[in-house]
Amino acid sequence: MKRILLIYTGGTIGMFQNPQTGALENFDFNNVLLHIPELRQFNLHLASTTFEPPIDSSDMDPSQWSKLVRIISDNYDSFDGFVILHGTDTMAYTASALSFMLEGLSKPVILTGSQLPIGTLRTDGKENLITAIEIAAATHEDGTPRVPEVCILFHNKLMRGNRTTKSSADQFDAFKSFNYPLLARAAVEIEYNDEFILPYNPQAVLKPHFSMDSHMVIFSLFPGMQASLVEKMLNTPDLKGIILRSFGAGNAPQKKWLSDALSRATEAGKVIVNITQCTGGSVVMQRYETGIQLLSTGVISGHDSTVEASIAKLMFLFGLGLTPEEVRSKMNECIAGEITL
Ligand code: ASP
Protein backbone atom coordinates (compact mmCIF):
# COMPACT_ATOMS: atom_id res chain seq x y z
CA MET A 1 0.00 0.00 0.00
CA LYS A 2 1.44 3.40 -1.00
CA ARG A 3 1.94 5.88 1.78
CA ILE A 4 1.20 9.56 1.18
CA LEU A 5 1.81 12.42 3.60
CA LEU A 6 -0.54 15.43 3.37
CA ILE A 7 0.95 18.64 4.70
CA TYR A 8 -1.59 21.37 5.29
CA THR A 9 0.03 24.81 5.50
CA GLY A 10 -3.12 26.95 5.32
CA GLY A 11 -5.06 28.82 2.64
CA THR A 12 -8.56 28.63 1.25
CA ILE A 13 -8.53 24.90 0.53
CA GLY A 14 -8.50 24.06 4.22
CA MET A 15 -11.70 25.88 5.10
CA PHE A 16 -15.28 24.81 5.32
CA GLN A 17 -18.52 26.59 6.09
CA ASN A 18 -19.87 25.85 9.53
CA PRO A 19 -23.48 24.81 8.81
CA GLN A 20 -24.69 26.35 12.08
CA THR A 21 -23.00 29.76 11.87
CA GLY A 22 -22.26 30.08 8.14
CA ALA A 23 -18.72 31.21 9.05
CA LEU A 24 -15.60 29.86 7.30
CA GLU A 25 -13.55 27.74 9.67
CA ASN A 26 -10.33 25.81 9.34
CA PHE A 27 -10.86 22.20 8.40
CA ASP A 28 -9.10 19.57 10.52
CA PHE A 29 -6.91 17.69 8.08
CA ASN A 30 -6.34 14.95 10.59
CA ASN A 31 -9.96 14.05 9.88
CA VAL A 32 -9.58 14.29 6.14
CA LEU A 33 -11.20 10.90 5.53
CA LEU A 34 -14.31 11.96 7.45
CA HIS A 35 -14.71 15.08 5.34
CA ILE A 36 -13.78 13.51 1.99
CA PRO A 37 -14.89 9.87 2.21
CA GLU A 38 -14.14 9.48 -1.53
CA LEU A 39 -10.47 9.21 -0.54
CA ARG A 40 -11.19 5.77 0.94
CA GLN A 41 -11.57 4.48 -2.61
CA PHE A 42 -7.83 4.84 -3.07
CA ASN A 43 -6.05 1.90 -1.60
CA LEU A 44 -3.58 4.21 0.16
CA HIS A 45 -2.26 4.94 3.57
CA LEU A 46 -2.84 8.67 4.12
CA ALA A 47 -1.29 10.54 7.00
CA SER A 48 -1.43 14.26 7.60
CA THR A 49 0.30 17.02 9.44
CA THR A 50 -0.75 20.63 9.82
CA PHE A 51 1.04 23.93 10.28
CA GLU A 52 0.11 25.31 13.68
CA PRO A 53 -1.42 27.80 13.14
CA PRO A 54 -2.28 27.41 9.45
CA ILE A 55 -1.16 30.50 7.53
CA ASP A 56 -2.44 32.53 4.63
CA SER A 57 0.15 32.02 1.93
CA SER A 58 0.91 35.76 1.83
CA ASP A 59 2.72 35.07 5.12
CA MET A 60 4.95 32.36 3.65
CA ASP A 61 8.65 33.05 4.04
CA PRO A 62 11.96 31.15 3.97
CA SER A 63 11.51 29.94 7.55
CA GLN A 64 8.23 28.27 6.51
CA TRP A 65 9.93 26.78 3.45
CA SER A 66 12.60 25.26 5.63
CA LYS A 67 9.87 23.89 7.91
CA LEU A 68 8.42 22.13 4.86
CA VAL A 69 11.86 20.82 3.89
CA ARG A 70 12.28 19.53 7.46
CA ILE A 71 8.91 17.72 7.39
CA ILE A 72 9.66 16.14 4.01
CA SER A 73 13.23 15.11 4.86
CA ASP A 74 12.25 13.70 8.27
CA ASN A 75 9.51 11.62 6.66
CA TYR A 76 11.25 10.88 3.38
CA ASP A 77 11.90 7.19 3.96
CA SER A 78 8.48 6.48 5.43
CA PHE A 79 6.37 7.88 2.57
CA ASP A 80 6.13 7.37 -1.18
CA GLY A 81 4.87 10.86 -1.96
CA PHE A 82 3.96 14.21 -0.43
CA VAL A 83 0.99 16.50 -1.08
CA ILE A 84 1.26 20.06 0.20
CA LEU A 85 -1.97 21.99 0.66
CA HIS A 86 -1.09 25.65 0.26
CA GLY A 87 -2.77 29.01 -0.38
CA THR A 88 -2.69 29.85 -4.05
CA ASP A 89 -1.24 33.37 -3.74
CA THR A 90 2.39 32.37 -3.21
CA MET A 91 2.22 28.71 -4.15
CA ALA A 92 4.49 29.23 -7.17
CA TYR A 93 7.18 30.78 -4.94
CA THR A 94 7.04 27.87 -2.50
CA ALA A 95 7.11 25.30 -5.31
CA SER A 96 10.13 27.06 -6.84
CA ALA A 97 11.96 27.28 -3.53
CA LEU A 98 11.34 23.60 -2.70
CA SER A 99 12.59 22.51 -6.12
CA PHE A 100 16.01 23.92 -5.18
CA MET A 101 16.00 23.14 -1.46
CA LEU A 102 15.14 19.45 -1.99
CA GLU A 103 18.27 18.53 -3.92
CA GLY A 104 18.34 14.91 -5.08
CA LEU A 105 14.55 14.52 -4.76
CA SER A 106 13.28 11.29 -6.29
CA LYS A 107 9.71 11.22 -4.94
CA PRO A 108 6.65 13.29 -5.89
CA VAL A 109 6.02 16.54 -4.00
CA ILE A 110 2.72 17.90 -5.30
CA LEU A 111 1.40 21.30 -4.21
CA THR A 112 -2.25 22.12 -4.58
CA GLY A 113 -4.89 24.45 -3.17
CA SER A 114 -8.20 25.87 -4.30
CA GLN A 115 -10.08 29.03 -5.16
CA LEU A 116 -13.14 27.99 -3.11
CA PRO A 117 -12.97 26.41 0.36
CA ILE A 118 -13.19 22.64 0.35
CA GLY A 119 -16.37 22.65 2.39
CA THR A 120 -18.42 24.87 0.05
CA LEU A 121 -20.70 24.00 -2.85
CA ARG A 122 -18.90 24.03 -6.22
CA THR A 123 -15.52 23.84 -4.53
CA ASP A 124 -12.54 23.09 -6.73
CA GLY A 125 -10.66 21.89 -3.64
CA LYS A 126 -11.92 18.30 -3.60
CA GLU A 127 -10.96 17.59 -7.22
CA ASN A 128 -7.60 19.24 -6.78
CA LEU A 129 -6.85 17.31 -3.60
CA ILE A 130 -8.02 13.94 -4.95
CA THR A 131 -6.07 14.33 -8.20
CA ALA A 132 -2.94 15.52 -6.37
CA ILE A 133 -3.05 12.44 -4.13
CA GLU A 134 -3.55 10.13 -7.11
CA ILE A 135 -0.53 11.66 -8.87
CA ALA A 136 1.63 11.55 -5.73
CA ALA A 137 0.95 7.79 -5.52
CA ALA A 138 1.29 7.03 -9.23
CA THR A 139 4.04 4.68 -10.36
CA HIS A 140 5.36 3.20 -13.56
CA GLU A 141 4.90 -0.53 -14.11
CA ASP A 142 8.27 -1.20 -12.47
CA GLY A 143 7.08 0.56 -9.30
CA THR A 144 9.19 3.72 -9.72
CA PRO A 145 7.42 7.06 -9.16
CA ARG A 146 5.75 8.60 -12.17
CA VAL A 147 6.55 12.22 -11.23
CA PRO A 148 9.67 12.41 -9.04
CA GLU A 149 9.76 16.21 -8.80
CA VAL A 150 8.10 19.28 -7.21
CA CYS A 151 4.89 20.11 -9.09
CA ILE A 152 1.74 22.17 -8.85
CA LEU A 153 -1.53 20.42 -9.62
CA PHE A 154 -4.38 22.79 -10.30
CA HIS A 155 -7.58 22.49 -12.34
CA ASN A 156 -6.56 19.16 -13.86
CA LYS A 157 -3.16 20.44 -14.98
CA LEU A 158 0.08 19.11 -13.58
CA MET A 159 2.87 21.67 -13.99
CA ARG A 160 6.53 21.75 -13.03
CA GLY A 161 6.50 23.85 -9.84
CA ASN A 162 9.35 26.16 -10.79
CA ARG A 163 7.76 26.90 -14.20
CA THR A 164 4.40 27.93 -12.78
CA THR A 165 2.83 31.34 -12.12
CA LYS A 166 -0.52 32.26 -10.59
CA SER A 167 -2.38 33.82 -13.49
CA SER A 168 -5.90 34.43 -12.20
CA ALA A 169 -7.30 35.68 -8.91
CA ASP A 170 -10.78 34.34 -9.54
CA GLN A 171 -10.82 31.58 -12.16
CA PHE A 172 -10.58 27.90 -11.25
CA ASP A 173 -7.95 27.66 -13.98
CA ALA A 174 -5.62 29.82 -11.89
CA PHE A 175 -2.09 28.70 -12.82
CA LYS A 176 -0.09 28.68 -16.02
CA SER A 177 3.20 27.22 -17.10
CA PHE A 178 4.06 29.65 -19.89
CA ASN A 179 7.45 28.34 -20.93
CA TYR A 180 7.23 24.61 -20.26
CA PRO A 181 4.70 21.97 -21.38
CA LEU A 182 2.24 20.42 -18.93
CA LEU A 183 3.59 17.34 -17.17
CA ALA A 184 0.15 15.74 -17.15
CA ARG A 185 -3.49 16.48 -17.74
CA ALA A 186 -6.24 14.82 -15.74
CA ALA A 187 -9.19 13.83 -17.92
CA VAL A 188 -10.98 10.49 -17.85
CA GLU A 189 -7.46 9.10 -17.39
CA ILE A 190 -4.45 11.02 -16.12
CA GLU A 191 -2.41 11.52 -19.27
CA TYR A 192 1.27 11.91 -18.41
CA ASN A 193 3.74 13.63 -20.75
CA ASP A 194 6.62 11.42 -19.66
CA GLU A 195 9.12 13.07 -22.00
CA PHE A 196 8.84 16.36 -20.06
CA ILE A 197 8.99 14.89 -16.54
CA LEU A 198 12.38 14.76 -14.80
CA PRO A 199 13.64 11.15 -15.00
CA TYR A 200 13.68 9.00 -11.88
CA ASN A 201 17.21 8.48 -10.62
CA PRO A 202 17.58 5.36 -8.45
CA GLN A 203 20.97 6.60 -7.18
CA ALA A 204 19.64 9.98 -6.03
CA VAL A 205 20.03 10.75 -2.34
CA LEU A 206 17.96 13.53 -0.82
CA LYS A 207 20.13 16.44 0.28
CA PRO A 208 17.87 18.92 2.04
CA HIS A 209 18.91 22.59 2.25
CA PHE A 210 17.48 24.82 4.92
CA SER A 211 18.89 28.28 4.44
CA MET A 212 17.85 30.92 1.97
CA ASP A 213 19.34 34.40 1.77
CA SER A 214 16.66 37.00 1.17
CA HIS A 215 18.80 40.12 0.62
CA MET A 216 17.20 40.48 -2.79
CA VAL A 217 14.82 42.73 -4.67
CA ILE A 218 12.63 42.30 -7.72
CA PHE A 219 12.69 45.47 -9.76
CA SER A 220 10.49 46.17 -12.82
CA LEU A 221 11.67 48.72 -15.36
CA PHE A 222 9.08 51.26 -16.53
CA PRO A 223 9.20 54.24 -18.86
CA GLY A 224 10.02 57.35 -16.83
CA MET A 225 11.70 55.74 -13.82
CA GLN A 226 13.73 58.20 -11.76
CA ALA A 227 17.52 57.99 -11.76
CA SER A 228 17.89 59.04 -8.13
CA LEU A 229 15.52 56.37 -6.84
CA VAL A 230 16.96 53.56 -8.94
CA GLU A 231 20.54 54.54 -8.05
CA LYS A 232 19.69 54.60 -4.37
CA MET A 233 18.09 51.15 -4.54
CA LEU A 234 21.03 49.65 -6.46
CA ASN A 235 23.45 51.18 -3.96
CA THR A 236 21.82 49.63 -0.90
CA PRO A 237 24.75 48.09 1.02
CA ASP A 238 23.04 44.85 2.15
CA LEU A 239 21.54 44.12 -1.24
CA LYS A 240 23.06 41.00 -2.85
CA GLY A 241 20.85 40.17 -5.78
CA ILE A 242 18.43 41.93 -8.12
CA ILE A 243 15.87 40.37 -10.41
CA LEU A 244 15.57 42.98 -13.13
CA ARG A 245 12.29 42.67 -15.00
CA SER A 246 13.13 44.16 -18.38
CA PHE A 247 11.11 44.84 -21.52
CA GLY A 248 10.46 42.23 -24.23
CA ALA A 249 13.43 40.01 -24.99
CA GLY A 250 15.53 41.58 -22.22
CA ASN A 251 15.74 45.25 -23.15
CA ALA A 252 16.22 48.40 -21.07
CA PRO A 253 16.34 52.15 -21.81
CA GLN A 254 19.70 53.25 -23.23
CA LYS A 255 20.22 55.86 -20.51
CA LYS A 256 23.79 56.37 -19.40
CA TRP A 257 22.80 56.82 -15.76
CA LEU A 258 21.14 53.38 -15.81
CA SER A 259 24.14 51.54 -17.32
CA ASP A 260 26.47 53.35 -14.91
CA ALA A 261 24.33 52.41 -11.91
CA LEU A 262 24.08 48.77 -13.02
CA SER A 263 27.84 48.55 -13.68
CA ARG A 264 28.60 50.02 -10.26
CA ALA A 265 26.27 47.52 -8.60
CA THR A 266 27.94 44.62 -10.45
CA GLU A 267 31.38 45.88 -9.44
CA ALA A 268 30.18 46.05 -5.82
CA GLY A 269 29.44 42.27 -6.01
CA LYS A 270 25.69 42.39 -6.57
CA VAL A 271 24.27 39.84 -8.99
CA ILE A 272 21.73 41.29 -11.44
CA VAL A 273 19.54 38.83 -13.33
CA ASN A 274 17.58 39.90 -16.37
CA ILE A 275 14.16 38.34 -16.88
CA THR A 276 11.38 39.57 -19.12
CA GLN A 277 8.19 41.31 -18.01
CA CYS A 278 6.36 39.28 -20.68
CA THR A 279 4.54 36.25 -19.32
CA GLY A 280 6.02 33.98 -22.00
CA GLY A 281 9.30 33.84 -23.89
CA SER A 282 12.93 34.25 -23.06
CA VAL A 283 15.57 36.92 -22.56
CA VAL A 284 18.00 37.15 -25.50
CA MET A 285 20.13 40.18 -24.67
CA GLN A 286 22.09 39.96 -27.92
CA ARG A 287 19.00 40.65 -30.04
CA TYR A 288 18.74 44.45 -29.73
CA GLU A 289 21.15 47.29 -28.99
CA THR A 290 19.09 47.97 -25.82
CA GLY A 291 19.88 44.47 -24.56
CA ILE A 292 23.54 44.47 -25.58
CA GLN A 293 24.06 47.55 -23.46
CA LEU A 294 22.75 45.64 -20.42
CA LEU A 295 25.17 42.78 -21.09
CA SER A 296 28.10 45.19 -20.94
CA THR A 297 27.09 46.21 -17.39
CA GLY A 298 27.56 42.64 -16.13
CA VAL A 299 23.83 41.84 -16.00
CA ILE A 300 23.29 38.11 -16.61
CA SER A 301 20.45 36.42 -18.43
CA GLY A 302 17.65 34.78 -16.48
CA HIS A 303 16.72 32.97 -19.71
CA ASP A 304 13.02 31.97 -19.71
CA SER A 305 12.68 31.84 -15.93
CA THR A 306 9.56 32.87 -14.04
CA VAL A 307 9.96 35.67 -11.48
CA GLU A 308 9.22 33.16 -8.74
CA ALA A 309 11.90 30.69 -9.84
CA SER A 310 14.57 33.33 -10.45
CA ILE A 311 14.20 34.96 -7.03
CA ALA A 312 14.04 31.58 -5.28
CA LYS A 313 17.17 30.44 -7.15
CA LEU A 314 19.10 33.58 -6.16
CA MET A 315 18.01 33.15 -2.53
CA PHE A 316 19.06 29.52 -2.64
CA LEU A 317 22.48 30.08 -4.23
CA PHE A 318 23.40 32.93 -1.88
CA GLY A 319 22.02 30.79 0.96
CA LEU A 320 24.64 28.16 0.07
CA GLY A 321 27.28 30.79 0.82
CA LEU A 322 28.54 31.01 -2.78
CA THR A 323 30.52 34.02 -4.00
CA PRO A 324 28.84 36.41 -6.49
CA GLU A 325 30.98 34.92 -9.28
CA GLU A 326 29.85 31.37 -8.36
CA VAL A 327 26.22 32.54 -8.14
CA ARG A 328 26.50 34.10 -11.62
CA SER A 329 27.81 30.89 -13.07
CA LYS A 330 25.12 28.71 -11.38
CA MET A 331 22.38 31.08 -12.57
CA ASN A 332 23.43 30.06 -16.07
CA GLU A 333 22.95 26.37 -15.27
CA CYS A 334 19.62 24.60 -15.15
CA ILE A 335 19.64 22.98 -11.72
CA ALA A 336 16.04 21.83 -11.20
CA GLY A 337 14.44 22.10 -14.64
CA GLU A 338 13.71 25.82 -14.12
CA ILE A 339 15.17 27.24 -17.36
CA THR A 340 15.54 26.19 -20.97
CA LEU A 341 19.13 26.42 -22.21
N1 ASP B 1 -5.12 34.25 0.34
C1 ASP B 1 -5.21 32.82 0.17
C2 ASP B 1 -3.81 32.25 0.29
O1 ASP B 1 -3.03 32.32 -0.61
C3 ASP B 1 -5.82 32.49 -1.13
C4 ASP B 1 -5.88 31.02 -1.44
O2 ASP B 1 -5.72 30.16 -0.62
O3 ASP B 1 -6.14 30.69 -2.57
O4 ASP B 1 -3.48 31.73 1.34
Image (cartoon, helix red, strand yellow):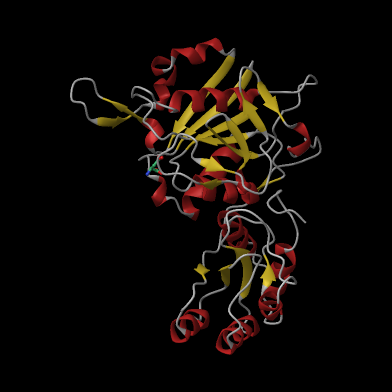
- Residue 17, horizontal then vertical, whole percent: 28, 26
Location of the C terminus (image quadrant): bottom right
Residue 294 quadrant: bottom right
Count of numbered labels shown in the rendering: 0
Left or right: where 104 falls relative to 47? right
Residue 271 against residue 33 in the figure, above or below: below
Q: Which residue is outermost to the left? A: 21
Closest to the observer, 163 or 149: 163
Q: Quadrant of ligand 1?
A: top left
Residue 288 quadrant: bottom right
Closest to the observer, 48 or 88: 88
Residue 104 against residue 139 in the figure, above or below: below
- Residue 306, horizontal then vertical, whole percent: 60, 55
The residue under the point 60% across, 88% down is 260
- Residue 272, horizontal then vertical, whole percent: 62, 72
Residue 323 appears in the picture as rendered: no
Residue 31 against residue 68 in the figure, above or below: above
Q: Which residue is outermost to the top? A: 41
